[in-house]
Amino acid sequence: MQPDAPPYVTSPVGFPLTGQTLLQRLAAADAGERARGHEVLARLYWRPVYTHLRLKWRLAPPDAEDLTQEFLAGLCADDTLRTFDPARGRFRTFLRGCLDHQVANARRAGQRLKRGGGATHLSLDFAGAERDLAGGAVDGEAVLEARFRAEWVAALFATALEEFRHRAADGRHAVHLALFERYDLGPASGAERPTYAELAREFALPATQVTNFLAWARREFRRALLDTLRAGCASEEEFRAEARELLGTDAP
Amino acid sequence: MSARSHAVAAHLREVLRVPEVPGDRYQIRERVGEGGMGVVYRAFDRLLGREVALKVVRPDVDPEAFTHRLRREAEILARLEHPGIVPVHDAGVLADGRAFYVMKLVRGGRLDEVAAGQGRAATLRLLLRVCDAVASAHAQGIVHRDLKPANVMIGPFGEVLVLDWGIARILREPGEGPAVPGTPPANPAQPDDTAPGAALGTPGFMAPEQGRGDGSQVDTRADIFALGEVLRTLAGPDAPPALRAIVARAKAGDPAARYPTVEAFAADVAAFLDGLPVAAYREPVSERLARLYGRYQTPILLVVAYLVMRLLFLALRGL
Ligand SMILES: Nc1ncnc2c1ncn2[C@@H]1O[C@H](COP(=O)(O)OP(=O)(O)OP(=O)(O)O)[C@@H](O)[C@H]1O
Ligand SMILES: [Mg+2]
């Protein structure tokens, strides 16, 4: 497995993620396209959902795991997503609202949150999510909202990185990818960022080549990120707004 | 996914956000502004040892479409040599493929900010300098199409610089002879007219023919319309009738009813400032007298004082 490939989904996503928004995919006539939509939904949202259930509703891990699976499967099965109204806010906020609604209803009905519920089980790395939860429950809508978003952003970049690696694995861009991993991903793991000259020596390339290859990699990564983002947003407008917030210079 | 995923995401966001200029000539220092197409940074030019402004395509827009627009803007700026138009020094491509160009760093404020802190006459004099720059562009066959106070910077010594030529329209190539308002431009279909992502122009400042999105109908008179709106916002709500008449003429819905040239518009604004009759306004006698009084206040007062003295003298003598 790649060092930072998301470990929570075992099956490959139906790449490439180009062109369509999430809601378009989920409503597609083509079953393959719909499956791809479900896959994207799960990849980008399972972790925010799980974390939210643990932090806000203080569900025990097994209950949170089950409900996460059930919630995501339910979204794809019923008409919930059709009630999304872009005029009333972001898709992310809508999902969180649906989730809260579902938990509150279940509680009001005095129902024990049912296990399993016949949902198709995705392979999700709950243990990993659990490790990051240290610190316990969180209060306050603003904090919960920020946390939901942060989980979503991390999932988005991890998925985009996977998409990018997939695109670079065409037999012609191995060095481009290696340079990107070394120069742009290395520093995230605490490594010192090398200079272009050092990279040129290390990879036995002319310095201009390093510039060109890295340019290609960043351009492709940006493209993969924007494609993944669009695939995970409800509409083009939302995609543009999210892109601005994520990559705009005054993004939080 | 682990805490490392959050770190990777944060790091990659940074990578995508701060522009990386290949080579080591430019060092990015801080963001100084942004618009719909680009982000502008203050940067240090190590080669020449000075600070410059570096404009790049925004990181969150379709790089291809906007790269084209930014390049075109740089070319247009390079062509328009005028003290009122920001000079461009260099152009290139960032490490991630986005286009950038380097221009003079303008310190100081935007026209709308500067106008808020000074009197009407001082602001109108700045507007006249804007007109000079725009007229020079028109003479070179280029229409700005997005004139507004936010696109004009005022330097610390009062220099006026017109920015943001990203959606400018080239009416004719150099050496093609002067453009005659009303005649169709030499190259009606410019690639930029169909640039995706943004309505070209700013509502309120956009002439009706420009708002209809028919690029081929837009000529220098669209800029005169925008200058009229600039004048309206700068003149304030209590603008005198003569100024309001200038605004109305500049902003006429029919391009043929507007001032034929920026120079004619500027001449009327200058006439107003000098207390002279304004071509766009037929003033009533009372206003005319008031204007003449304003303009010739000192001599009029001197004559009146003299006459009063004289009368007093005669009256005293007669006693
Ligand atoms: N040469 C410069 N020196 C200093 N600041 C500048 C310079 N050029 C632009 N700026 C600042 O950056 C901001 C954005 O620049 P500009 O208007 O050129 O961008 P844009 O994306 O083309 O805008 P628009 O959305 O209006 O098309 C300006 O409003 C101004 O504050
Ligand atoms: Mg601007």
Image (cartoon, rainbow, N blue to C red):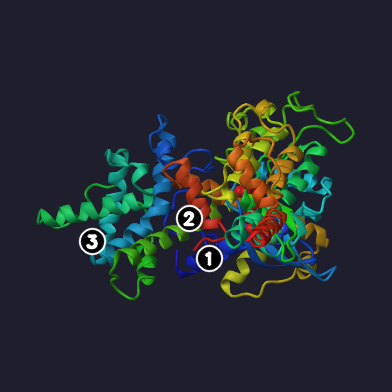
Q: Is residue A219 left or right of residue A206?
A: left
Query: Along the horizontal axis of the image, is B297 left or right of A211?
Result: left
Q: Looking at numbered disc 1 in the image, what kind of residue is underneath it?
A: Ala
Q: CA distance from mark 1 to mark 3?
A: 30 Å
Q: Given the image, on which type of amino acid does mark 3 rest?
A: Asp
Q: Residue at coordinates 74% horizontally, 51% vertically from top-left?
A: B129
Residue A179 seen anywhere in this rendered image of the structure: no
Q: Secondary structure at mark 1?
A: helix
Relative depth, front residue between B310 and B165: B310
Task: Give the residue number, with chain letter if any, for mark 1.
Answer: B10
Q: Are marks 3 and 2 in contact (CB under 8 Å)?
A: no
Task: Kindly report which numbered mark, 1 or 3, lies closer to the viewer in this rendering.
Answer: 1
Q: Is residue A141 left or right of residue B274?
A: left
Q: Earlier in the sequence, mark 3 or mark 2?
A: 3
Neighbour tally class for label 3: few under 14, some 14-19, many 20 plus, Cα within 10 Å:
some
Q: Residue at x 62, y 51 (%)?
A: B149
| Disc 3/disc 2 C-alpha distance (Å) | 25 Å
Q: Which mark is residue A63?
A: 3
Residue at x 71%, y 39% (from the top left corner): B265
* Numbered mark located on residue A104 in the image: none
Using the rendered image, report if marks 2 and 1 lie on a common chain: no
**Disc nearest the viewer among 3 and 2:** 2
Picture mark count: 3
Residue at mark 1: chain: B
Cα gap from disc 2 to disc 1, whole angstroms: 11 Å
Point out the image quarter for the C terminus of chain B. bottom right
Give the residue at mark 2: A156
